[in-house]
Amino acid sequence: MLVAAIAIVALVLLIAKFKLNAIISITIVSLLLGLAAGMEPKHVVDAFGEGVAHTMAQLAMIIGLGTMLGKMLAESGGATVVASGITRFFGTERVDYAMMVAAFIIGVSVFFQVGLLLLGPIAFALARETKTPILRIGLPLAAGLSTAHGLIPPHPGPLAAIGILGADVGKTIAWSLLVVGPPVALVTGPLLARWVTPRVKVGFAGLGESASAKPSAPHTPGFGISIFTILLPVLLMLVKTAVELPWFANGAVAGTWQADFRIWAEFIGDPTVAMLVAVLFSFWSFGRACGLNSHQILRFSEDCLAPAAGVLLVIAAGGGFSRVLNDSGVGKALADVGGHLHMSPLLLGWLIAGMLRVAVGSATVSVQTAASIMLPFVQADPHINKELLVLSMGAGSLVLSHVNDGGFWLVKEYFGMDIPQTLKTWTVVETGIAVMSITLILIVNSLLPLFHHA
């Protein structure tokens, strides 16, 4: 555990103080950690490589396909259509609520960074039109995106934890999308922003001030088809979960087609297949139907992959670091210590992910590592709700975003804030999401036995 603590501090120093590339920093620290923990040199290299391979096998296609879907959403103008439609529904006086809802919906299928760049220009336009302080709209935007990114698959953090713990993707989506996510985004977005905004004065500046929200497509898609395309992968994964529920598996749905339907539902509900179907559909709904030709669609789908490569390598290195941590015995040592704390496994997972988040900065790496550390608990106690544990670690991975987090700098530069202003706004929102999420998760977990006995 001491070696692990030193490794985490070293990782922070390499990235934050010495400005060493995150991929190189994680790789160096992973190898030195394994050697310092007494692992054989070949075992260290093998463990790191296996962690990288496992992570890439789970996430590479999903991240690549998700990036393509986000690009098509931007170029078609679908993001603008969704935000405008929701704004009309809520009214100009509640544009902060509208932006939070739009960000939460769009954040289901795109990365935080992509969602901010998609909806940020709309937030600035709405702020100017309604003469509203930019943070009153910008913070709900960031809260909606961050809540979806931290809690809802197929985002890489929750998805990696699902793979490590063997949790169910569809059940995790259901809990995060229907129970935990919306109230958390509501309170930490519009309501918290209305309290923070008068206390932190920020003008129209930063990257968002000069950003353009103009799409490339000659025609924009309709509101309904935009929402359907964005949520299509989630719907497909929920179908897979539905056919695995006892009422279906036990024959409550009669007919000889039941077995075949379940086989194909499990196939099409696989995260990679679901994302592929959504991307192919977006080539029509956000592409050809909006006046884009095949050459433009090909160019958009290729251009967006270069930025995704860096994200993939950081995540893969984090997977290697997680595997070395686990193989070196650090995970077992932490699990042994945690076992004597007499603490709920859900709260323990949240605390471990939170400590890693503060130390490392990456929410995805924090969830991955916390999941590896919590794996012995799950294996020892079959009564732990693995889906809620995934959500608790996802929530912990959002706490106290500061200078070692790439999202911190993106939000700072996009809204033209200085570091103290970003700490008073973005860091407060992220911590609010983490604290409220774990509170709701613990309440839900305590109520589950009542439904089982009913």
Image: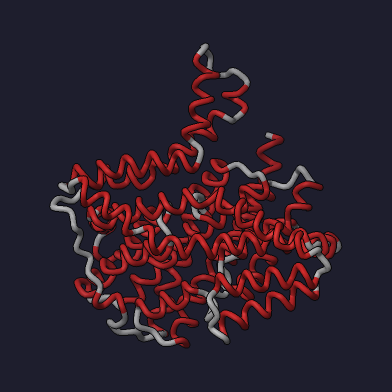
Q: Quadrant of residue 279?
A: top left
Residue at the extreme top of the image, as rendered: 256
Residues 139 and 34: in front is 34
Residues 236 and 20: in front is 20
Count of numbered labels shown in the rendering: 0
- In the rendering, at what x and y percent does residue 81 appear? 23, 54
Q: Is residue 71 left or right of residue 349?
A: left
Q: Is residue 173 left or right of residue 73?
A: right
Query: Which residue lies at the image location 35% right of the left edge and 50% below the top edge?
Result: 69
Q: Quadrant of residue 106?
A: bottom left
Query: Which residue lies at the image location 49% right of the left edge and 57% below the top edge?
Result: 183
**Colour scheme in the image?**
secondary structure
Question: In the rendered image, which quarter contains the C terminus?
Answer: top right
Q: Is residue 338 left or right of residue 400?
A: right
- In the rendering, at what x and y percent does residue 1 appear? 80, 71
Query: Which residue lies at the image location 59% right of the left edge and 65% below the top edge?
Result: 397
Query: Which residue lies at the image location 40% right of the left edge and 74% below the top edge?
Result: 194
Residue at the extreme front of the image, as rendered: 42
- In the rendering, at what x and y percent does residue 58 appear? 56, 48
- In the rendering, at what x and y percent does residue 213 appear? 23, 65
Whether residue 343 is visible here, answered yes or no, is no
Whether residue 136 is visible here, answered yes or no, is yes
- In the image, residue 30 sits, relative to residue 199, either above or below, namely above
- In the image, residue 253 sits, relative to residue 187, either above or below, namely above
- In the image, residue 395 sits, relative to residue 5, either above or below, namely above
